[in-house]
Amino acid sequence: MAEKGISTKTLKDGSKHYYVRFMHQGKNYPPKNFTKLYGCRTEKQTFAKLQEIKLLISQGKDPFSSSGSTLNDIFDTRLKQKVENGDWTHSTPKNYSYFYNAYIRKSIGHKKIEKITYDDLLKIQNGMTHVANSTKNTLKMILRPIFVESIKKGVIHKNVVDMLETYNMPVRESLEVRTDEKHLDIVRKLYNAIPKYKALQKTQQEEVRMFLYLTLLTAHRYGELLKLRIEDCYIDKRMIISPKSITKTKEDYKFPIPQELLEYLKKIESGLIFPTIKRGGIYAIFQRLVKLAGIELYNNKRISLHDTRRFMLTIMIRDLDIDSMLADTCLNHKQRGTINHYLSFVYKDIEKAYHQYWELIRNDE
């Protein structure tokens, strides 16, 4: 038997909707579609939501106006708060804003959150046909926290974002199926091609070359290197301390500065050391360097800037007989299990390993 005040209606598409008419604190509330408003799919869910609604009214709140803001309003407010609180720094606000404006703002941003359906989100996701899987997953990364918070506030009953597919990242191909060239030969060719590299904008030429040197010779994640500031560089000690706010491991990390960058860094007074290079342009920059270096690849195969991490690890272990754990530490990989607690290398170990690597790369005999 249906609860008092709760009725059902079957729509033309065959879906069953639950409507609620109730009186609370002397006020009559007209029928409201709890399935449409809050995603209630059963009488039990509808009754539970009704009790939440009555509690909010008893607290002096208007539950039916609590979701008056559009998704655009909520996102913009959240973005501002995250930046002001320091939760989102560096590239996160910029990347999220770019994605939101490109895929969400005009398509569903004008809607109130309880009006957004799974089909709305699926249409956005299916429309990203020429986008990498990591970028497709950004849709869930941005929207899920917003929907979770709306559930806590009683605005919606179900998080339709969780129904979306999470895309798996592609497995990287081994180097052997992309080229016959050895790791050491590839890195040497790339290193020797950097001085010949001509940026599309002449004003960027030195900056791009220095970025390529630092990425190739340290094998650090280029996203982190783009966030480095001159304040992180201790030129007199020839050392960089990458702050935990930008590292993937969320820990400060020290590594030596290659001599190729010293004069460039001395000219920077403040701010980012690579101020004009954009993350979205990195792939094209590196592919031009690969072509300039004359690296022979099989048809339709590519090597990426991320492969420099694989190159360094392999060369350190195979060509220089450096301890594998030390080589892994140079990549700023966080060790797991008991090793994380008992094995530790001092900075001098890391510095020495890097200098051995650099000497081998520069010596092209």
Image (tube, helix red, strand yellow):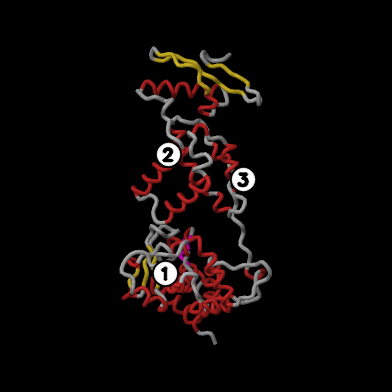
Q: CA distance from mark 3 to mark 1?
A: 47 Å
Residue 338: x, y in percent? 47, 59
Label disc, if present, on residue 126 of the rendered structure: 3
Q: Quadrant of the N terminus?
A: top right
Q: Nearer the viewer, residue 161 or 128?
A: 128
Name which residue lies at 31% across and 66% down. 270
Disc 1: CA contacts within 10 A as few (<14), some (14-19) or many (>=20) = few
Q: Please report whichever mark, 1 or 2, sits nearer to the chain's N-terminal start.
A: 2
Q: CA distance from mark 3 to mark 2?
A: 24 Å
Label disc, if present, on residue 345 of the rendered structure: 1
Name which residue lies at 65% across and 72% down. 297
Q: Residue furthest bottom?
A: 365
Q: Residue furthest right?
A: 299
In the rendered image of this protein, does residue 314 appear above or below residue 70?
Answer: below
Residue kind at label 1, given as amino acid type = Phe
What secondary structure is found at the residue carrying circle 1? Answer: loop
In the rendered image of this protein, does residue 274 appear above or below residue 258?
Answer: above
Residue kind at label 2, given as amino acid type = Ile
Q: Is residue 332 magenta?
A: yes
